[in-house]
Amino acid sequence: MKAFILAAGFGTRLRPLTDHLPKPLIPVLNIPSLFYTFFLLKQAGITEIICNIHHHSNAIRHFIEASDLPGISVVFSEEPVILGTGGGLKKCEKLLGSDEFLLVNSDIITDIDFRALINHHHQSGRPGTLTLYKTPEAATIGYVGVQNGLVIDFRNLRNSGLVSSYIYTGTAVLSPEIFKFLKEEFSGIVDTGFTGLIDNGGLSYYRHEGLWKDIGTMQNYWLANLDIASVITKTSHQMNLAIGIHPHSISPEAFISPNADIACSVIGKGCHIGADCTIRNSVLLPDVIIKPGSTIINAIIDPYSMTVMKHQQ
């Protein structure tokens, strides 16, 4: 089975971070977010990956090629004009071939068991299976309407009246049947492909009850680095064995003054922390310079905007 990773988006909600760095390469515990998906795919035995790219496409391509991920083959589908989640997938119809495939968003940190998802999909007998996650924030994020083990609606767009506490995680197993309903121009997968499968064979769903975090907003990005850091680092050894890198809070390639006071923070590669600095509950992306005597609390800082983005408690 092949995997298709959606990695072409602009990451608008993460600006100014994504003005200079594509969202798939924004680090969570000093590992590009996209590499967490590579790790899960490798664990599940899925090593042929197709990745669509547009925003900062060269940066993504060069970084992945330079990483030399063991046992993983990545083919890029570059979109000179962005095509959305539906059009981007349609463009890769020939690359994906006639077999079912795994679809994954590039901006999630999760421990979804892809093997269990695939097995559930096979047992369902449906042309597609979405992974759903229960959360009290479903009404805000966008709830999925379910009935009798099937996905029926999204945000009541189909006027089903169905409301739930489940959201779509950005992960699915799909048959090539979906390509019949996708459009080649810019389009979304929900109102083309997913709707088409709902009406033609049905969409089943698999409930995930473990870790799931969308890093698409500043708040969620901060939380992924700090609030769930202990959960992520539990996979450190396994990730190192699988793809040769592992999550860590303090980069060994950062300079930190001996008398700097750092707690509950992530310090990226190439950072320079001056003397008498205090840093608490903050995320410093690679190459950030903190002047001596500075105090940084509840913040995200990148080296380009020179802006401190305060986390809201």
Image (spheres, rainbow, N blue to C red):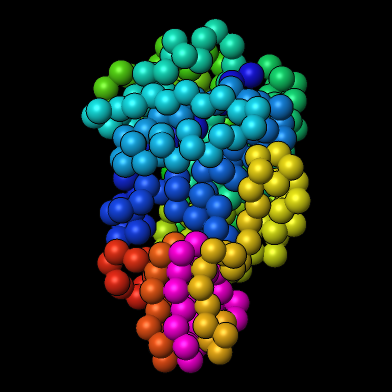
Q: In this picture, is 5 found above or below 1? A: below
143 left or right of 293 in image: right
* Quarter occupied by residue 94: top left
Q: In this picture, is 241 found above or below 116? A: below
> Residue lying furthest left in this view?
81
Magenta extent: 263-283
Residue 267 counted in the magenta span: yes
- Residue 8 pos. (x, y %): 37, 36
Closer-to-camera residue (286/222): 286
Residue shown at 51% from the left, 73% from the top? 255
Q: Can the viewer see residue 145? A: no
Q: Can the viewer see residue 43? A: yes
- Residue 171 pos. (x, y %): 56, 36
77 left or right of 109 in image: left
Residue shown at 45% from the left, 57% from the top? 140
Split into 4 quadrants, where in the image is the N terminus? Answer: top right
254 left or right of 9 in image: right
Q: In this picture, is 73 found above or below 162? A: above
32 left or right of 134 in image: left
